[in-house]
């Protein structure tokens, strides 16, 4: 079984550069045809592998391929797949340290490494999660319990109008009505306006609200914008607010000199979210929450059952069930620990530097194209642009939607769009470890040819 599956997996990975960047034509119809009853008898493994690799897997976005420049690419590093195979095969329980002390320590090592990368002080901690959404939720609950009374419904939190929607969702799931989340306008570089943020706090205090939390972005999804984290940290400290940074996309650029320069102040956060499945190129479902004071997580999430073994009362090993909502959880630390031990951190640093270089190159090439406007200059590895021919009477939003569709129809790269200041723009995000100069040049050529086709 293992040999048969491995053969198909290797063939799939080797063919990634030749696969379409996206291939979802007819996928919805196929999906509807696949509604099936509970099987009474088993099927051949070869038959099932053929279905998966020949029919089912290809009908999707090629998120692991070099041409995936959409949203925020995930990685899918093969070393992590090997780790997942081991972790699920041995099937050890790591929610409580007593059940697997050594394996819990391996995962704790990963957390300590991440704290070091982020610049957090000794004694900081955290937990691996399923992604940034869960990390933002856990942080919001911790902040609520740390900074607000039991009756918390006068509490207000402050975010940019560019913040990831999972932050607003986290507030809602943590019990806050939508009106308690203050969306502060961003500036021309799509960063939160700190003066407007401070003014909103003053107004809320005068009106009897209880400001308790501010969320900064270290790499927004829309444009890769990085808020002024030092200014937000200073304001949060003076106002007694919990300072959370959503660094799910941008946090691991702290491995690079340019990233550290652009994210000064990240190390002052009370909590921050990271997505190793983005900046460390690991499989989807690998997120992380870091906190300056791990005790805040335990106060927020600790619970007890008579059937549970004794929890850790002092330093050392961590009971992950005590610092997050999860009791049952997979051994997700191995998919981080094994690649880092096998490769070291330097290849990841070099790859992230390459992505910054490729984004700079992409932006420079876009500037050479007639009637192309750079709407959002890259702060990390995202650039947003718009085709705006002077004097053209066509609807520019619709024109750019057609341009996006024309580029993606070539299937060598896959891009996505978004709205900035009410205008539809096209965005390029370079983050996959498989994306190199050759593929970026293909994408730029597809943009040029698609623009030429629209101009005719």
Image (tube, rainbow, N blue to C red):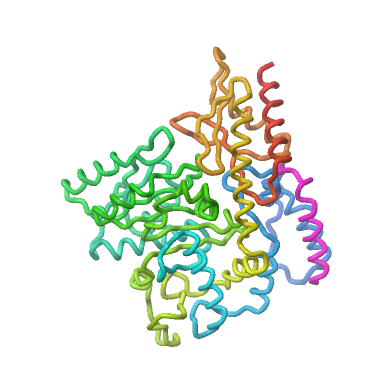
Q: How many marks?
A: 0
Asked if residue 21 shows in the view, the reply is yes
Q: Which image quarter holds the C terminus? A: top right
Q: Where 42 falls versus 268 (above or below)?
A: below
Compared to residue 6, the image places residue 436 above or below, namely: above
Residue 356 spot, x, y in % from top left = 59, 44
Front position in the image: 10 or 180? 10
Question: Does 122 appear above or below 8?
Answer: below
Residue segment shown in magenta: 1-25
Q: Where's residue 348, x and y in %? A: 62, 57
| 57 displayed left or right of 379 | right
In the displayed image of the protein, which residue is found farthest to the top? 391
Q: Is residue 84 visible?
A: no
Is 170 located above or below residue 18 in the figure?
A: below
Residue 277 is covered by the magenta coloring: no
- Place of residue 353 in the rendered image (x, y in percent of width and height, measured from the top left): 60, 48
Residue 88 location, x and y as percent?
65, 74
- Residue 8 among those drawn in magenta: yes
Q: Residue at x 38, y 56 (%)?
A: 244
The residue shown at (58%, 24%) is 372
- Quadrant in the picture for residue 426: top right
The answer to which image quadrant residue 1 occupies is bottom right
148 relative position to 311: left or right: left
Identify the residue at image location x=36%, y=49%.
230
User: Which of the two residues, 46 or 454, is positioned nearer the viewer here?
Assistant: 454
């Amino acid at each position: 079984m293992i040999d048969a599956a491995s053969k198909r997996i290797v063939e799939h990975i080797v063919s990634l550069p030749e696969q379409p960047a996206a291939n979802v034509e007819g996928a919805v119809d196929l999906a509807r045809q696949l509604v099936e009853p509970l099987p009474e008898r088993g099927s051949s493994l070869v038959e099932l592998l053929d279905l998966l690799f020949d029919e089912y897997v290809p009908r999707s976005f090629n998120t692991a391929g070099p041409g995936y420049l959409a949203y925020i690419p995930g990685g899918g590093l093969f070393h992590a797949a090997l780790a997942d195979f081991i972790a699920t095969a041995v099937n050890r329980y790591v929610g409580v340290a007593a059940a697997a002390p050594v394996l819990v320590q391996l995962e704790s090592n990963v957390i300590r490494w991440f704290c070091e990368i982020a610049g957090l002080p000794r004694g900081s901690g955290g937990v691996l999660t399923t992604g940034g959404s869960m990390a933002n939720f856990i942080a919001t609950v911790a902040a609520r319990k740390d900074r607000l009374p039991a009756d918390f419904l006068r509490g207000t939190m402050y975010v940019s109008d560019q913040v990831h929607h999972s932050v607003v969702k986290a507030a809602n799931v943590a019990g806050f009505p939508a009106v308690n989340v203050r969306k502060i306008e961003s500036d021309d570089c799509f960063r939160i306006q700190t003066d407007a943020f401070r003014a909103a706090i003053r107004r809320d205090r005068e009106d009897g609200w209880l400001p308790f939390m501010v969320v900064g972005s270290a790499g927004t999804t829309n444009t890769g914008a990085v808020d002024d984290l030092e200014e937000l940290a200073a304001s949060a400290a003076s106002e007694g607010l919990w300072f959370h940074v959503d660094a799910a996309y941008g946090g691991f650029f702290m491995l690079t000199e340019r990233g550290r320069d652009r994210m000064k102040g990240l190390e002052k956060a009370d909590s921050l979210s990271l997505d190793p499945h983005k900046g460390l190129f690991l499989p989807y479902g690998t997120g992380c929450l870091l906190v300056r004071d791990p005790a805040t997580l335990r106060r927020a999430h600790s619970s007890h059952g008579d059937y549970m073994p004794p929890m850790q009362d002092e330093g050392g090993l961590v009971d992950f069930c005590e610092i997050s909502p999860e009791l049952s959880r997979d051994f997700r630390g191995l998919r981080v620990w094994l690649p880092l031990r096998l490769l070291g951190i330097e290849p990841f640093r070099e790859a992230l530097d390459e992505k910054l270089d490729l984004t700079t190159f992409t932006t420079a090439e876009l500037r050479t194209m007639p009637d192309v406007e750079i709407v959002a200059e890259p702060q990390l590895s995202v650039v947003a642009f718009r085709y705006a021919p002077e004097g053209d009477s066509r609807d520019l939003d619709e024109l750019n939607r057609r341009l996006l569709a024309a580029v993606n129809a070539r299937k060598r790269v896959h891009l996505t769009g978004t709205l900035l200041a009410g205008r539809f723009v096209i965005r390029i995000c370079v983050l996959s470890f498989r994306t190199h100069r050759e593929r970026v040049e293909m994408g730029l050529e597809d943009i040029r040819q698609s623009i030429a086709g629209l101009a005719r």
